[in-house]
Structures are given as C-alpha cells and as structure tokens.
Image (cartoon, helix red, strand yellow):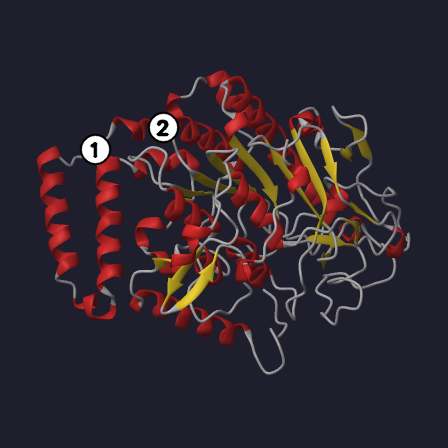
C-alpha cells in the first residue's frame, strides 16, 4: 500500500526479508529460558485475569472518535486547514468527558473505564501501517534479529491458560490472506516462544464453531487415528532439520492442545448459534461486532487473551486516505453498540472487574499533518489540495503519531477517569502526560500481573516484555 522507503536505501521488500530472517532464527532457536534475575523481581499483584484487545486496525482518528476538537461541517470550498473534527462532540456518562457523535452507546459506558488522550507513537522513519502495527503489538520496532512475540503470546507464555482446554491467545477477525498479509503474519505470532503460545486465528467469528469440530462425517475413531498419524508425520517430517528440538516439541504440543479442545465440551463457547437471539442482535452489526460477542463467550469459558480486530486491509475500514467522514459514519455503526454491549455484558456477569478491555489503534489521523511536527514523512493522502471540493475530501486522511486515544475498561482501571490531553488546535500533539507504546504495554502487563522487566534469555541475549525493560506502568490509571 505505502511506497515510502523505510529508511534511506531500504524498501518494504527489504523489511520483509529481514522479518523472514528473524522468523527463521526463531525456528532454529533453542528454548528461551526465563532469565535468572527474574527471581529478584517483585511481580505485581494482578488486577485482571483476562484481557480483550479491541484493535481498530488502520489508524483510528482520535479527533473523530475519542478526542473531539473544533467541529466544522462539510462545505464546498472550505479550507482543509480549518478541519479538526468532522463529527461534533457529545456528552457521555461522565460530566468532564465528551466523545464524538456516532459513539452514543460507548458514551453511556464511559463511567466504567479510563480514557487516555495522550498516547504517542514514533514516526519510525516512515509512517507505515505494517511497521506501526508490528511495533504496537510486540513493543519492538521492526525489523529485529529475532521474531518478537505478540503481547498475547507473552501472556500465554508467562501466565498460561486460565482454562487448560482453551487456547490462551485467540485472534478474531483478521484474515491472513488479504492485503499486506505477510506483514500482518509477522506480528501475529508467538515468535521465539514457540507455536504452542501463538494465536488461534478465527477470521470469521460466525464460523468459529467449525474450527473446533472434526471435519463433517469423520467418526471419533477415525479422528483419533488421524491424530496419531499426524503426530508421526510431524516427528518424521523432513523439516525437522530446520527446527530446533524445542521448536519441534512446541509445535507438537500445539497440536496436542488443539486435539484436546476438539474433544472437549468447552468448544461450545465458540458456537455463536448457542447465544440467545436477543443477545446476538446487539452484536450483529458487522464481523467485528460478532467478534465482540465471541470474545465475551470465550472470556466466560476461561480464555486469557483475545484480540478482536476491525481487520486491517489497505484502504478499508479505519484506513481513511479518502472518503474519511463517510467511512467513519459506517465504522461508528459497526463498533459502537457491540463495544458498549460487551462492557455491559461483562459487568452483568461479574467479569468486568477482572477483565481488562483495551480499545487501541496504531496511530491517529489529521486533515493536514503527516506524522507529527517536524516529520519528514511523505504525504499519503489521496487528496492533497488546500480546499474541500467534494464530500470525499471531508475527513482526516493523514497518518498522525503525535497524539492518539486509548480507552481501558475494567481490569482494575479507574472509572470515569480522563488521563492526558492533546492541544486544542493543530498540531494536536500530546501536551499533558504522554504515554508511549512501552509505557502502555507496561500498564497492560502490570494489570495482568507481569512485570515490564520480565525477561527471557534468547540465544544468550536478554529479551524483555517491554523494550529493554524500560516500560513504566501508568499508576494513575489504576483504581
């Protein structure tokens, strides 16, 4: 999608080659060992047992969602520089917090969580979705010499499953055969931790039940025999020479885990047809909405970490290089009621206090500024004129890394709390209490009972939960 170089003399192809090299290194790696000095760490007391990440893939514009600015409606010939928000602000359940029109349902549950308005991301040389999504999900700037684990894989490896039958890490809503699939696969992985800690990928929530049942017409005996044969094939595979003993054993364990799930009654949690129609209707706004329903069912059944994504496909959903306002009208309809219903359902079931729900994205957007103040990033907006000449020009089309919003519900977070701020006029950079990716990860890990300094020895090198172990949890967010 983005033709910009990652840095002088390097291209996306070079980026992928380096990622592939890191992946191969992971396959050859020996077992990562919990670093000896971890015994000296004081692991935080967890305030959450499960985490749901609601990923707004493609760059959700904060001024059109959780951080409304000065609003002006569309008017032909209006200067683009005058546009800060294309949706007016609305009241929420919290007197001092306003969000954007179109999110009326979420507005009514803002008293259940905290809103960060000062999340910031680096430019990383070029403002590329693939690089920023990799950075956000792993905490490390690509490319790396090792395959970095997704934050869900960290929870899977360090905490293990809540229910031994269910995968500890489940990824809902992202197809891995669409645009930029290789870049997405690069961070949707357990990396050097091994296959057993990687995600169970469920691109279509309504088809999740099929993923946990033997093929149609297969008898129990045949299923058992097939499993034994598969184990034999894995053990004798010609690829075994390219895998370390640890990685091969991890792969076998991942198949064992899958077999155990397919043989368990707990697989009913994946079946959305078992949900009452009245409940289903509140989530059935889109594939993302149905993913929120599946996430709620899986948390009830004992899942540890679940990511539900609006899905990243170039130029779709939140990737608003054109038709920004019109696209966001649709996106608001897709996410608003399901997210609010998820929060309410978890609360009613007594699960919200111990389930951390995070709404996040790779960066924000602006009508005029690409990157942030002083950035040398090239302009990637479809419309580069100074005025709005048609409705398609009305929207926030540029990638903006200087100020972004993150909402956090339950899991020990304060209720009805606003943290940080961005400037009221362009450039809308974070001007109070900036929160980096490392510090945000440290906050999430701390809530889950994992020290940000937790480290593993990988090929005789320490590798930390947050980059260099320097992430610091935002303590003010905790109740």
Q: Where's residue 47, x and y in %?
A: 53, 33
The residue indicated by pointer 2 is: 269
Crowd rating for badge 1 (residues with CA inside 10 Å; few <14, some 14–19, many 20+) = some
Cα separation between marks 2 and 1: 13 Å
| Residue under the image location 26 percent in, 54 percent down | 250
Judged left or right of residue 293, residue 157 is: left
- Give the quadrant of the N terminus: bottom right
| Residue under the image location 25 percent in, 60 percent down | 246
Q: Where's residue 160, x and y in %?
A: 36, 42
| Contact between labelled residues 1 and 2, with CB atoms less than 8 Å apart | no
| Residue under the image location 12 percent in, 33 percent down | 220
Number of numbered tags placed on the structure image: 2
Mark identifier at residue 119: none
Judged left or right of residue 440, residue 138 is: left
The residue indicated by pointer 1 is: 263
Q: Where's residue 344, x and y in %?
A: 58, 22
Q: Is residue 201 visible?
A: no
In which quadrant of the rendered view does residue 12 lie?
Answer: bottom right
The local secondary structure at tag 2 comes to helix
- The single residue placed furthest to the front in the displayed view is 40
Front-most of residues 351 and 47? 47
């Amino acid at each position: 999608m983005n033709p910009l170089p990652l840095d002088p003399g390097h291209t996306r192809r070079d980026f992928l080659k380096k990622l592939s090299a890191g992946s191969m290194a992971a396959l050859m790696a020996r077992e990562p060992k919990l670093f000896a000095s971890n015994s000296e760490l004081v692991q935080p007391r967890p305030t959450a047992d499960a985490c749901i990440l609601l990923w707004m893939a493609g760059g959700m514009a904060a001024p059109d969602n959780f951080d409304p600015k000065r609003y002006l409606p569309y008017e032909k010939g209006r200067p683009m520089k005058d546009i800060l928000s294309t949706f007016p602000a609305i009241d929420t359940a919290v007197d001092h917090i306003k969000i954007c029109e179109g999110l009326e349902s979420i507005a009514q549950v803002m008293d259940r969580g905290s809103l960060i308005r000062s999340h910031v991301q680096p430019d990383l040389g070029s403002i590329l979705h693939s690089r920023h999504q990799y950075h956000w999900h792993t905490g490390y700037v690509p490319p790396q010499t090792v395959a970095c684990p997704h934050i869900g894989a960290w929870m899977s490896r360090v905490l293990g499953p809540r229910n031994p039958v269910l995968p500890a890490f489940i990824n809902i809503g992202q197809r891995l055969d669409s645009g930029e699939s290789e870049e997405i696969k690069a961070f949707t992985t357990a990396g050097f931790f091994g296959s057993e800690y990687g995600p169970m990928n469920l691109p279509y929530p309504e088809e999740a039940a099929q993923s946990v049942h033997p093929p149609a017409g297969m008898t129990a005996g045949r299923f058992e025999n097939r499993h034994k044969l598969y184990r034999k094939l894995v053990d004798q595979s010609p690829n075994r020479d390219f895998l370390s003993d640890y990685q091969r054993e991890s792969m076998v364990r991942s198949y064992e885990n899958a077999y155990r799930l397919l043989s368990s009654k707990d697989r009913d949690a994946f079946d959305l047809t078992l949900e009452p129609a009245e409940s289903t209707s509140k989530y059935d706004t889109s594939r993302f909405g149905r993913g929120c329903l599946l996430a709620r069912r899986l948390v009830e059944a004992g899942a540890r970490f679940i990511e539900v994504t609006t899905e990243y496909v170039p130029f779709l959903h939140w990737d608003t290089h054109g038709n920004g306002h019109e696209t966001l009208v649709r996106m608001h309809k897709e996410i608003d009621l399901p997210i609010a219903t998820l929060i309410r359902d978890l609360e009613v079931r007594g699960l919200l206090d111990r389930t951390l729900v995070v709404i996040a994205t790779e960066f924000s957007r602006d009508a005029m500024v690409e990157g942030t103040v002083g950035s040398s990033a090239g302009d990637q907006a479809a419309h580069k004129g100074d005025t709005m000449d048609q409705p398609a020009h009305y929207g926030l089309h540029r990638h903006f890394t200087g100020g972004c919003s993150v909402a956090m519900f339950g899991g020990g977070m304060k209720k009805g709390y606003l943290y940080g701020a961005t400037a009221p006029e362009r450039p809308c950079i974070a001007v109070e209490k900036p929160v980096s990716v490392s510090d945000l990860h440290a906050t999430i890990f701390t809530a889950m009972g994992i020290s940000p300094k937790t480290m593993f020895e990988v090929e005789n090198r320490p590798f930390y939960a947050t980059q260099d172990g320097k992430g610091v949890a935002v303590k003010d967010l905790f109740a």
